[in-house]
């Protein structure tokens, strides 16, 4: 794209400049590398996959986006309904007008800081594809540390037939459904206060063919489980949760992609970020089996605070703290005493 067009934003992409997949001939039968003849003999720009990726990367970079190349590739793959490798194998393929129009819309939304996952409507997590909407938090790689920790501990316990876990604040269902996918004898119950989020989780369960092994309950944290008395009391092998943990005073400093678009109810953890952990620690042990555990994702500097809270409660015994790949304490596992 011409340098002067870079300042025009997504409007610089001319939908009418697309051509078919056939070579474009210039006057005299020579291939026209920079465009094709339009009415009146004026050449039109040809937008190939490689060219538009390069332009979009530069435009996203100027907009201050953190991963401009990756965002461009994911969005173009979404528009073309192809895997990302297709973009490199077919980098010189011209794009059609409808494809350019759809991609331009994606560009406009992304430079407004709408998350890529909300634009495409899905996110990969633990090797699986999950539908996401603005009603659900977008699954992140950090949370895979939590899932891996739970997988290891449930496998170590021989994963008894009909073993039951609870996922509290399930959102898209990514945590719970990943566990069910990789532990075929596991059963689960999930809870979320948002009916919109639960609808997304149920759709994901159906898409992964896991619906028969999971139950969805609407309500506040552990309350729906406690309300059913003996059905869940002392029955769960594990409780898993990635609750809201951002201190309220830190919300304003979050990236605009998060602050302006992701559900505030899945972010705001109260004044110190620990409100939901206190509730899990207070009531969780009563729902666990004797050898059960509570596994939670935590924010920076919160692991030691949770450990101190648990040590002050007689129902909790051993505490494990697991670091993520950056060395940050990311997961806390508490075992029922």
Image: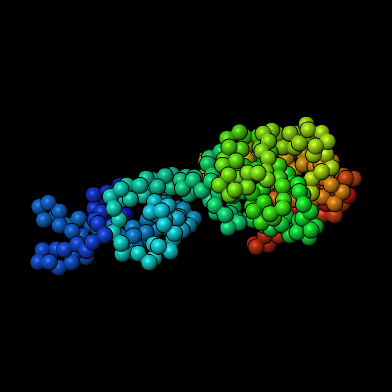
Residue at 41% x, 53% y: name it. Answer: 81
Residue farthest to the top, as pictured: 227
The image quarter in which residue 49 lies = bottom left
Q: Is residue 85 left or right of residue 101?
A: right
Q: Is residue 13 in sight in this rendering?
A: no
Residue at 35% x, 64% y: name it. Answer: 90
Q: Is residue 77 left or right of residue 270?
A: left
Q: Position of residue 91 (x, y in %)?
A: 34, 64
In the foreground, 179 or 304:
179
The image quarter in which residue 61 lies = bottom left
Q: Position of residue 144 (x, y in %)?
A: 64, 56
In the foreground, 97 or 1:
97
Residue at 72% x, 51% y: name it. Answer: 186
In this rendering, the count of numbered labels is 0
The image quarter in which residue 250 lies = top right
Q: Is residue 33 left or right of residue 262?
A: left
Quadrant showing the N terminus: bottom left
Q: How is the image coloured?
A: rainbow
Q: Position of residue 128 (x, y in %)?
A: 57, 54
In the foreground, 322 or 60:
322
In the foreground, 35 or 232:
232
Q: Is residue 280 in sight in this rendering?
A: yes
Residue at 30% x, 62% y: name it. Answer: 93
Q: Position of residue 60 (x, y in %)?
A: 41, 54
């Amino acid at each position: 794209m011409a340098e002067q067009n870079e300042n025009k934003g997504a409007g610089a992409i001319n939908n009418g400049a697309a051509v078919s997949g056939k070579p474009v001939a210039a006057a005299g039968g020579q291939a026209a590398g920079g465009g094709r003849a339009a009415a009146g003999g004026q050449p039109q720009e040809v937008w190939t996959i490689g060219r538009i990726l390069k332009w979009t990367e530069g435009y996203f970079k100027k907009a201050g986006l953190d991963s401009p190349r990756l965002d461009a590739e994911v969005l173009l793959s979404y528009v073309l309904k192809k895997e990302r490798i297709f973009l490199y194998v077919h980098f010189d393929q011209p794009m059609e007008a409808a494809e350019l129009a759809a991609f331009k819309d994606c560009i406009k939304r992304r430079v407004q800081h709408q998350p890529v996952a909300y634009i495409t409507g899905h996110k990969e997590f633990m090797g699986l594809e999950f539908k996401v909407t603005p009603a659900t938090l977008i699954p992140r790689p950090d949370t895979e540390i939590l899932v891996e920790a739970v997988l290891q501990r449930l496998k170590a316990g021989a994963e008894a037939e009909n073993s039951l876990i609870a996922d509290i604040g399930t959102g898209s269902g990514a945590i719970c459904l990943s566990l069910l996918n990789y532990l075929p004898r596991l059963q689960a119950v999930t809870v979320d206060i948002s009916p919109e989020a639960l609808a997304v989780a149920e759709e994901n369960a159906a898409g992964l063919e896991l619906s028969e092994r999971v139950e969805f309950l609407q309500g506040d944290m552990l309350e729906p489980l406690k309300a059913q008395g003996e059905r869940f009391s002392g029955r769960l092998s594990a409780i898993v949760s990635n609750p809201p943990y951002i201190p309220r005073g830190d919300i304003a400093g979050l990236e605009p992609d998060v602050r302006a678009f992701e559900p505030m109810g899945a972010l705001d953890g109260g004044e110190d970020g620990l409100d939901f952990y206190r509730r899990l620690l207070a009531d969780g042990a009563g729902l666990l089996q004797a050898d059960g555990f509570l596994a939670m994702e935590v924010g920076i500097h919160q692991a030691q605070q949770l450990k101190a809270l648990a040590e002050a409660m007689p129902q909790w015994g051993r505490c494990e703290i697991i670091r993520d790949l950056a060395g940050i304490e990311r997961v806390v596992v508490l075992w029922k005493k």
